[in-house]
C-alpha cells in the first residue's frame, strides 16, 4: 500500500513540477528583459501595489513596479508625488470634468425632449444617464500617459495581437532595435465606434510590438474600420534554443516607449535566444 501511495504522489507531483519549471523559465525571461531595460528606466521601485515610490521621494517622474514571481508584465507608473505629474493630473481632471458637464447637459436636453414627446404622444421615452464612460477620451488619455506596460511573451507557435485604432499598425521606419525581426507601432489616436443611436469616441494608447527570434515577418490584418490583428508565426530556424522566440508589447506613454526602445541594452535580450 505504501508503494502505491508513493506512486500516486509521484503522478500528482509531476504536473506541479512542470508548472514550477515553467514559472522559473518565465521569471528568467522577464528578469532578463527587465535587466535589458534598466538603462532606459533609471527609476526607483514602487511599493508592491504600484501606488507610491518605495523611497518616498518626489524627484523622479516614474517608478517601476517590482517583479512578482510568475508575472509576465513590467509596469512603469508615473510617480504621483512628482510635482509635474500632479500638475498634469490636475489639468486632465479639469478636462474630464468638462466632459462630464457636457454629458450632463446632453442628458438634460434629452430628458426635456422625452417629456415633451410623452406629453404629445402619451408614450414614455428612454433617457440616457451620465455614466463613468462619459469622462471620455480625456480620462483614457491621462491613464495611458501615466504608465507604460510591457507584456513579455515567448516560445509560442504563433502570436496574435488585437488592436482597436483609427490608424493601421505598421512597421516602424523611425525606430530600430538591434537583433529584432520587426517593430510594429501604432501612435496614440482617437477612434470612433458606433453605439446606437450615435457614435462613441475612444482613446487608443501608443503601442509598439517588438519581435525577436525565429519568427516570420508580422502580418497586419484589418478586421473592421477600427479593428486590426497583428500576427507572427514561428519558423524552424530557432528550433532547439531554450527561448526560440520573444515578443514584447509596450503600451502607454509614447515618449517613454520611445526612450525604452532607443536606450535599452538589447544584447541582454538577444543572449536569451542563443
Image (spheres, rainbow, N blue to C red):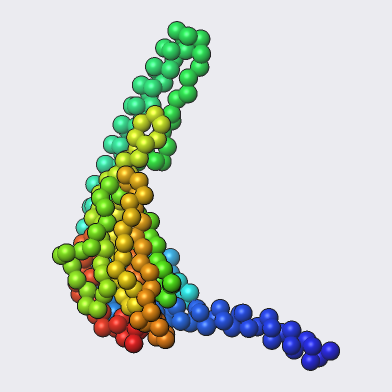
**Residue appearing at x 32%, y 32% in the figure:** 101
Residue 266 visible: yes
Above or below, 167 against 181 in this view is above
Residue 64 point in image, percent of width and height: 33, 70
Residue 110 point in image, percent of width and height: 38, 22
Q: Quadrant of the C terminus?
A: bottom left
- In the picture, residue 243 is in which quadrant? bottom left
Residue 176 point in image, percent of width and height: 19, 71
Q: Residue furthest right?
A: 1
Residue 260 point in image, percent of width and height: 24, 70
Q: Quadrant of the N terminus?
A: bottom right
The answer to whether 263 appears left or right of 248 in the picture is left
**Residue appearing at x 28%, y 36% in the figure:** 98
Above or below, 154 against 113 in this view is below
| Mark count | 0
92 or 172, which lies in front? 172
18 or 241, which lies in front? 241
**Residue appearing at x 18%, y 67% in the figure:** 175
Amino acid at each position: 500500500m505504501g508503494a502505491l501511495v508513493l506512486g500516486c504522489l509521484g503522478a500528482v507531483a509531476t504536473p506541479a513540477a512542470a508548472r514550477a519549471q515553467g514559472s522559473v523559465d518565465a521569471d528568467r525571461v522577464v528578469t532578463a528583459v527587465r535587466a535589458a531595460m534598466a538603462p532606459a528606466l533609471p527609476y526607483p521601485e514602487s511599493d508592491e501595489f504600484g501606488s507610491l515610490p518605495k523611497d518616498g521621494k518626489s524627484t523622479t517622474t516614474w517608478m517601476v513596479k517590482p517583479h512578482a514571481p510568475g508575472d509576465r508584465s513590467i509596469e512603469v507608473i508615473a510617480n504621483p508625488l512628482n510635482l509635474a505629474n500632479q500638475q498634469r493630473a490636475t489639468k486632465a481632471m479639469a478636462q474630464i470634468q468638462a466632459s462630464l458637464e457636457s454629458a450632463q447637459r446632453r442628458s438634460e436636453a434629452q430628458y426635456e425632449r422625452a417629456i415633451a414627446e410623452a406629453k404629445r404622444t402619451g408614450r414614455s421615452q428612454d433617457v440616457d444617464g451620465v455614466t463613468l464612460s462619459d469622462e471620455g477620451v480625456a480620462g483614457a488619455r491621462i491613464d495611458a500617459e501615466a504608465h507604460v506596460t510591457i507584456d513579455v511573451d515567448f516560445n509560442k507557435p504563433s502570436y496574435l495581437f488585437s488592436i482597436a485604432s483609427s490608424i493601421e499598425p505598421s512597421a516602424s521606419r523611425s525606430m530600430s532595435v538591434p537583433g529584432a525581426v520587426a517593430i510594429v507601432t501604432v501612435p496614440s489616436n482617437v477612434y470612433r465606434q458606433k453605439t446606437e443611436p450615435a457614435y462613441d469616441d475612444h482613446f487608443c494608447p501608443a503601442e509598439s510590438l517588438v519581435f525577436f527570434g525565429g519568427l516570420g515577418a508580422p502580418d497586419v490584418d484589418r478586421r473592421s474600420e477600427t479593428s486590426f490583428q497583428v500576427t507572427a508565426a514561428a519558423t524552424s530556424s530557432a528550433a532547439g534554443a531554450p527561448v526560440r522566440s520573444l515578443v514584447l508589447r509596450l503600451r502607454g506613454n509614447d515618449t517613454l516607449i520611445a526612450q525604452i526602445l532607443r536606450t535599452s541594452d538589447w544584447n541582454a535580450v538577444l543572449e536569451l535566444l542563443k
